[in-house]
Amino acid sequence: MFKSPINYSVKENIQPKYRKDIDGLRALAVILVVFFHGFPEWLPGGFIGVDIFFVISGFLISTILLENLEKNSFSFTNFYARRIRRIFPALIVVLSFALIVGWFALFPDEYRLLGWHIFSSASFFQNLSLLSEVGYFDEAAETKPLLHLWSLGIEEQFYLIWPLLLWLGYKLKANLLLLTVIIGLSSFGLNLIYSDTNQTFAFFSPLTRFWELLLGGVLAYLMLKTKLNLHHKNLSLVGIGLIAIGAITITSASTFPGWLALLPTFGAFFLIAASEQELVNRYLLSNKVMVYLGLISYPLYLWHWVLLSFIRITESGEVAQEIRLSAVTLALLLAILTYHFIEKPIQSSKFSKQKTIALIILMMLVAFIGFNFYKRDGLSFRAISYKNIDSIFVNYLKENGEDRQEGFIEGFTCKFYEGECQPLSPENKKILVWGDSHAQMLGYGLKKSLPKNWQFLLITQPGCKPAIILSSKAIKNDCERINFFATEQINKSHPEIVLLSQRDSWDPLKVDSLYENLSTMGVKKVLYLGKSPEWNAKLPKIIYRTSWRTPPRYSKVGLNIKALKLDLLAKAQFQANPHKQYVDLIDFLCNDEGCLIYVGSDLATGITSFDTNHLSPVASAYVAKELLMKYLD
């Protein structure tokens, strides 16, 4: 009769031999991440520290599993109880801190989102939740205090799946190394595919990340089950070199994970494989400071981003280096306190069963509170709530969500999906505004400001950059469909002016290509809309948080400086002529004091934006009358 290799008793699993240099490697990983989040200008590739953590976790967990399976001493109960006592205490404290600070610092929509992130983080699916939101490197990511917990979700999902797979493999007498390699290579293949086609999925999905933990699993098998001597005097130098190259050369603009993730993961692989006595392991990773930082690396990882994110939220964007340094220092202090007064007492063997049960209950309570705040729309009764933004700032134009999803056209005799289309006033001169939602934002102003002998035409799709599509056979998505429609209408109606719009900066090569094609189609003048001023948070929130007694006409508070620099770069490369011109919104709306926050005499009725980057209807009318009319000549 088959004897199960699993011991279901509550006795302790065998733990791997402690290595100081692995704690030092943890320290290196957390230093990279903290520096990237706090000072990205100093270390653009520091986010690869998370990949190092993955390899370490995969190595240690696989070592525990393989050793205990071999000795018939593995207990699922004990394995998960230890994970709970290791992971839950600091996480519960940090999530509770976020809930308390959010009560005082966040508007209802922000607090509602935080509530959902509390729930998803406490339930360990934050990475899956973020798949439907912004990417890790998007600007809005900095205003999500629990963004960094995506990596904890990956690890916990691995902890749920991998022990069962190894146990089944062992029970069926499968080759565990081959099993690890096959699953790891499959995951790596998906990583390569999605890094090119859907980078957000590649970054957050366990399917594209498990290979990093399994790389540590392969190393665990090789070190435990084979006589292969991995020690080499230069192995640690190769490892640290790969990590250094990755930290310096990889940036947020890189295609990542992809092939580039091999740099930090194999760097960690070689450092763990090297002997503790090798140069880097002995003198860098095993020194007392690095080992101690490794011991507090988990709470430090939890604390640092929460503090930095809340500061950026309350300051409406990036803050001075001195303030960021203070936040990192505070995170270090909180990590030390968390380690000594929360983690260590709870991880002790005394009353371990009772502590495990209490931690599960507390985590469920935190998850419930987060979900409750999410369902109650961020508790809008709180003092910071602005109730309804429309009661403070008057928005004259309500967008039609259905039209924005399917594509929006105006000034034609048809709807978007109908066949034959003609301009409503074919005898008038025509200006066609074509592009993304930044084209739509100009509609209100142009319709009010155009002379009677001009016809306004609008073809727009949110997030869709204008491009010439000559054949319906090339249509694969809504963006290509509306671009084909626009190309077709230009060929039919021959507008005098085409104003092209996209939020992203203009690529000089695409500018020239579009101009040549439109000129061939009979367009007399092509205008390229420059970037509008962008804010690090919704402008009404910035104004509300700043609490100006007398609001200034122009402001730099919360202004996205990166967007201004991108606009300058685009203009510097633009080759203008009388028939091809750049419409410089930033030059028109900004000066040395900042960018325009309201027009007219009343802030409530004249605010220039209701979000982070689109002009309000009032600002649209102001731009059309004072700037765009000059281009009709």
Image (cartoon, rainbow, N blue to C red):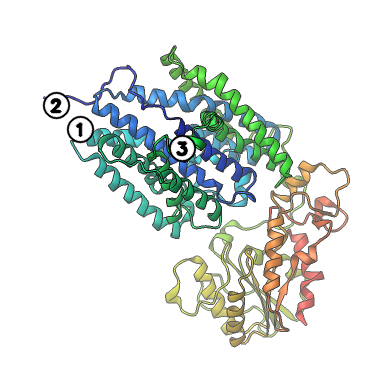
Judged left or right of residue 113, residue 51 is left
Q: Are marks 2 and 3 in contact (CB under 8 Å)?
A: no
Quadrant of the image occupied by residue 379: top right
Q: Are marks 2 and 1 in contact (CB under 8 Å)?
A: yes
What residue is rendered at 72% in x and 65% in y? 444
Q: Nearer the observer, disc 2 or disc 3?
A: 3
In the picture as drawn, the residue positioned furthest to the left comes out as: 1
Q: Secondary structure at mark 3?
A: helix
> Disc 3 to disc 1, how far (Cα)?
36 Å
> Disc 2 to disc 1, how far (Cα)?
9 Å
Q: Secondary structure at mark 2?
A: loop
Residue 632 versus residue 560 in the image, above or below: below
Residue 195 image offset from top left, x and y in percent: 44, 56
Quarter of the image containing the N terminus? top left
Tell which of 534 and 255 is nearer to you. 255
Tell which of 537 and 497 is nearer to you. 537
**Residue tagged 2:** 2
Q: Earlier in the sequence, mark 2 or mark 3?
A: 2
> Disc 2 to disc 3, how far (Cα)?
43 Å
**Residue tagged 3:** 281
**Residue tagged 1:** 171
Residue 507 image offset from top left, x and y in percent: 61, 71
Q: Are marks 3 and 1 in contact (CB under 8 Å)?
A: no
Residue 57 image offset from top left, x and y in percent: 41, 36
